[in-house]
Amino acid sequence: MNTKQTFFLVIVCGGILAACQEKKPVVEDNKAFMLSDTMMKRIELASVVTEPVRSELTLVGKVIADENRVIKVFPLVGGNVENVTVELGDYVRKGQVLATIRSGEVADFERQMIQAQAEVLVAEKNLKTAEELFESKLNSQREVTSAKKEVENAQAELNRMKEVFRIYGLGKTQNYIVKAPIDGFVLSKNVNPGMQLRSDNNEQIFTIGQISEVWVMANVNESDIPKVKLGMMADIQTISYGDELFRGSVDKIYNVLDPENKTMKVRIRLNNAGYKLKPEMHATVSLKFDEGGSMTAIPAGAVIFDRSKNWVMVFKGRSNIETREVNVYKMLNDVAYIQQGLKNNERVIAKNQLLVYDALND
């Protein structure tokens, strides 16, 4: 085949191929994206709003009982502990017996009480005799006056012993009964049956406390002290209830620093319904405060992080959804503060937005 024939064959084949390509139909998908009824039920929309920019200070603390509702029980006498009727953590009622102590001091008080009662009877009898003799002119008024004085002294001693019995809670027994001074929980117990207690013992044997309200004591670093104010709202989390937030407020700032760790203590008062919070629990405290200024804000869950950028799905209609890049200033709990990319009153998809994002951007 010569050169001319070859060139002619190439032209003919090229023409045939071009004709075939021209006849091939072009398929274009003009169908617009639209959310189905099912997807509309699955998503949630949130409006873009302007809010004050808030920040958070995280502190470490622990739960303690309200000191104003805690009473330490000391033994008023020495002796041998015969019985202990409660255990650590028990709930007790005011006046309930906590322990029984057999005490020589109580026996001595009982002796003094009997003696005081007897002396009153003797003094009253002597007075009656003196008055009868005076009426018979067998003694003087001075002797009657002296007898009355003896009755007064004996009655004063008896009243003193009665007050001792009342203070010590003594009865007609040689045992000293330790009773609960208030309703509450046994927060500490330092006594066991058979223990010998000294009368000069300066350690409490029980601590009874009410924990329907508790305190959380938290440490504030020196650099964060200016941020803490009275009345600040606080969220408390514990290891035991990791998914539950307990809310309270700062009701006292201790304006001194611990000389060892250079921290200042703050106190948060909490309602403790159900007694979930126990004294000595570790707690994480989050204090909320305003940074100053305002910024557009949306639910933090509406933000999608992809390709090293932050995106949101702006909802304008079922078939008009825009994937828009935003500049996130910061996220605080369930709020995202947006520096750039959104305007007030726009709406974003805040739930299952990732499904829509994938459908539009695959």
Image: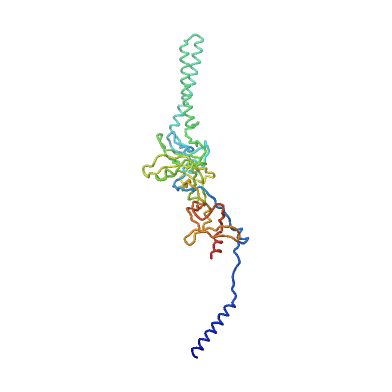
Tell me the colour scheme of the image: rainbow
**Residue sitting at the far left:** 260
**In this orientation, does residue 83 appear?**
no
Q: Is residue 156 above or below residue 76?
A: above
- Residue at coordinates 48% horizontally, 27% vertically from top-left? 163
**In this orientation, does residue 32 appear?**
yes
Tell which of 203 and 211 is nearer to you: 211
Residue 175 image position (x, y, % from top left) = 47, 34
Residue 327 image position (x, y, % from top left) = 48, 56
Q: Is residue 146 above or below residue 35?
A: above
- Residue at coordinates 53% horizontally, 56% vertically from top-left? 302
Tell which of 32 and 362 is nearer to you: 32
Tell which of 138 and 336 is nearer to you: 336
**Residue sitting at the far front:** 4
Q: Is residue 303 above or below residue 269?
A: below
Residue 182 image position (x, y, % from top left) = 51, 36
Number of labels in the image equals 0
**Residue sitting at the far top:** 137
**Residue sitting at the far bottom:** 1
Residue 296 image position (x, y, % from top left) = 52, 51
